[in-house]
């Protein structure tokens, strides 16, 4: 969870109560899902931990102070400098022209100008922290959102956002005193070494210049040393954000603009001209209000909170959270604040009602129903199998459920079988990375991966794992089936089909299940040395055999391996065999 550093005096000033003690702060911090991590030190710097990543507007003194000020009875602030699709603010000559050349590199740009009192140490530190938290946490380490702040009195509009030749374009980057090419910055500047990989593979790099050709910044890497060197005493700033998602950029710009406004600055909107379509048109005036009103029914609020709140009481609770709202025919409609975009469902509104009303306002109730917990029959069966495998000399392993297509498919199947294997595998729509893109359809790849890194251990290797797998199943209402499997691997120069078959016999004997085997065709195993495990009523229970040399080579495993994988949910339901259930 995000942690921020704030000057205590600056936070109290933003709250509008300079006499609050640390204990009093901790009493109201839950309104922002926050808690005091470390009290203020000698310099007055305190650390606050925020327990919600959905509220980036709270990651600054101004944002946190705003939330707590309104919660304590302050007036909900008005931000009249925002534009909408129906209303455009006066922008004077402040205009940014986006070039077609950035469309495939880093397409979106937003920005605005803020003018106000001279920046002091607390405001500058808070600004730098907001920039770092937004771009690191919310902006995926600058990949999705990069932010720059520049001295606007040195800028002649219009500003141009374009792609530049990384070898011929040179400027003095921030924190250096000599010119470097954009490509040299990637290797010679600390920020280039940290963030240059985001654009390193592109033929041209993003560049921000003003009308006379002076460089503002090389997003998402570094500002220029002249226009981009903000310091204490500056009174006029130009804020820019670049990235791939227009909505995230607009929200980030809104958060920073509201923070500046609350600190006494005047916000001057800027027109951004695009040569291509964006979700909000080809000309966007920033800051831009893109959120839509939301509605929740009074009945739903009371159902989820277990109370009997009236519409007026719900409105009062929401307004303590800084959310303008009004009752309407058994519902409450809200206007989402400019700096928030976390109302994805009516339940999010209900959460704000709960926090705004205060947890202490809800009377605790004793549970009406008392139940005795017990293990499910499947869990009991799993534990029997786990004890049995340990007794047979196997060591248990635990693996991730998510992995890559390379591991789950490419290393397991020959090229002609991969398309069908991918079609049966559950894929994540928005994965964090390609290493977590698929839900495992089998435990076998995980066992082979463990064997791959265990080549220095004394043989034989005998490992097993019990866990969930998932695969596509059109007969299920969800289109997928989740099952619990047992898989085990033996790696040794002497292992063969007879060994894995004897282990199957032992396992099913001790759990009291009858079974049959029949020849199978599975490209993961050696032809003729693989069998399908079936129950006496014909249901498929699993597969076992000798792993194909091609698969071992893909994994870098140097010794023969035998593997079995059993669907233990189906096994549990199979007919009893020659040994009765204990």
Image: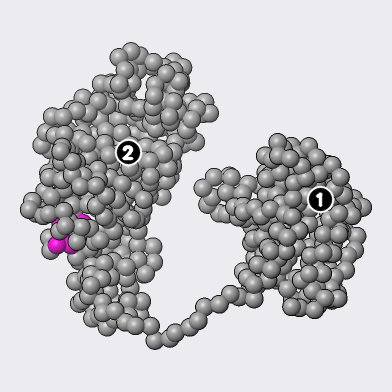
- Dot 1 falls on a residue whose secondary structure is strand
Furthest residue to the bottom?
368
Q: Position of residue 185 (x, y in %)?
A: 41, 20
Residue neighbourhood size for the residue with mark 1, other residues' Cα within 10 Å, grouped as few (<14), some (14–19), many (≥20): many
Q: Position of residue 269 (x, y in %)?
A: 23, 42
Point 57% across, 49% down: residue: 436
Question: From what the image shows, is residue 381 above or below residue 493?
Answer: below
Q: Earlier in the sequence, mark 1 or mark 2?
A: 2
Q: Judge whether residue 351 is colored magenta.
A: no
- Dot 2 falls on a residue whose secondary structure is helix
Q: Judge whether residue 68 is colored magenta.
A: yes
Question: From what the image shows, is residue 212 above or below residue 316?
Answer: above
Give left or right: position of 260 versus 403.
left
Question: From what the image shows, is residue 474 above or below residue 90?
Answer: below
Q: Position of residue 103 (x, y in %)?
A: 46, 36
Question: Can the viewer see residue 406 in this picture?
Answer: yes
The disc label shown at residue 562, or none: 1
Quadrant in the picture for the C terminus: bottom right
Question: Can the viewer see residue 523 in this picture?
Answer: no
Q: Position of residue 157 (x, y in %)?
A: 25, 29
Point 43% across, 31% down: residue: 195
The mark lying in front, picked from 1 and 2, is 1
Give the Cα distance between marks 1 and 2. Answer: 51 Å
Question: From what the image shows, is residue 295 above or below residue 173?
Answer: below
Furthest residue to the left?
19
Point 62% across, 54% down: residue: 398
Point 23% across, 70% down: residue: 358
Residue neighbourhood size for the residue with mark 2, other residues' Cα within 10 Å, grouped as few (<14), some (14–19), many (≥20): some
- Helix, strand or loop: magenta stretch: helix
Query: What residue sits right under mark 2 in the picture?
Result: 132
* Numbered range of the magenta stretch: 67-72
Furthest residue to the top?
178
């Amino acid at each position: 969870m995000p942690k921020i550093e704030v000057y205590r005096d600056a936070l109290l000033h933003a709250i509008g109560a300079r006499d609050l003690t640390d204990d009093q702060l901790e009493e109201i911090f839950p309104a922002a899902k926050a808690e005091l991590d470390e009290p203020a030190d000698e310099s007055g710097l305190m650390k606050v931990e925020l327990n919600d990543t959905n509220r980036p507007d709270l990651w600054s003194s101004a944002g946190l102070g705003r939330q707590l000020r309104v919660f304590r009875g302050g007036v909900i602030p008005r931000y009249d400098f925002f534009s909408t699709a129906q209303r455009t603010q006066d922008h004077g000559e402040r205009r940014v022209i986006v070039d077609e050349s950035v469309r495939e590199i880093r397409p979106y740009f937003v920005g605005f100008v803020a003018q106000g009192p001279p920046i002091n140490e607390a405001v500058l530190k808070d600004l730098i922290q907001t920039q770092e938290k937004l771009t690191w946490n919310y902006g995926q380490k600058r990949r999705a959102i990069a932010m720059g702040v520049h001295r606007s009195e040195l800028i002649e509009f219009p500003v141009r956002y374009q792609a530049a030749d990384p070898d011929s374009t040179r400027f003095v980057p921030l924190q250096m005193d000599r010119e470097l090419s954009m490509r040299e910055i990637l290797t010679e500047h600390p920020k280039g070494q940290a963030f240059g990989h985001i654009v390193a593979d592109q033929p041209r790099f993003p560049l921000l210049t003003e009308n006379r050709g002076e460089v503002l910044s090389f997003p998402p890497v570094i500002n220029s040393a002249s226009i981009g060197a903000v310091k204490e005493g500056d009174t006029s700033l130009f804020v820019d954000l670049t990235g791939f998602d227009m909505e995230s950029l607009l929200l980030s710009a809104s958060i920073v603009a509201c923070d500046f406004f609350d600190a006494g600055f005047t916000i001057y909107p800027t027109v951004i001209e695009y040569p291509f379509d964006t979700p909000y048109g080809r000309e966007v005036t920033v800051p831009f209000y893109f959120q839509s009103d939301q509605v929740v029914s009074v009945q739903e609020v009371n159902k989820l909170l277990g109370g009997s709140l009236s519409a007026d009481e719900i409105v009062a609770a929401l307004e303590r959270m800084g959310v303008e709202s009004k009752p309407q025919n058994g519902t409450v409609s809200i206007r989402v604040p400019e700096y928030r975009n976390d109302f994805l469902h009516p339940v999010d509104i209900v959460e704000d009602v709960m926090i705004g009303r205060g947890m202490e306002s809800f009377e605790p109730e004793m549970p009406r129903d008392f139940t005795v917990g017990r293990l499910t029959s499947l869990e009991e069966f799993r534990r029997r199998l786990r004890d049995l495998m340990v007794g047979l000399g196997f060591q248990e392993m635990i693996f991730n459920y998510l992995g890559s297509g390379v591991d789950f498919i490419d290393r397991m199947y020959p090229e002609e079988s991969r398309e069908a294997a991918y079609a049966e595998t559950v894929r994540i729509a928005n994965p964090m990375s390609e290493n977590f893109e698929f839900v495992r359809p089998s435990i076998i790849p995980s066992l082979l991966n463990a064997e791959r890194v265990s080549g220095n251990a004394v043989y034989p290797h005998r490992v097993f794992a019990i866990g969930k797998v998932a695969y596509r199943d059109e007969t299920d209402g969800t289109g997928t089936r989740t099952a619990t499997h047992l898989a085990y691997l033996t790696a040794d120069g002497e292992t063969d089909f007879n060994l894995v078959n004897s282990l199957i016999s032992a396992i099913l004997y001790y759990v009291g299940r009858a079974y049959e085997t029949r020849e199978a065709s599975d490209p993961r195993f050696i032809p003729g040395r693989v069998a399908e495990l079936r129950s006496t009523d014909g249901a498929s229970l699993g597969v076992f055999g000798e792993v194909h040399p091609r698969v071992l080579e893909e994994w870098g495993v140097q010794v023969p391996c035998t593997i079995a994988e059993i669907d233990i949910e189906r096994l549990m339901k199979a007919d009893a065999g020659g040994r009765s259930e204990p």
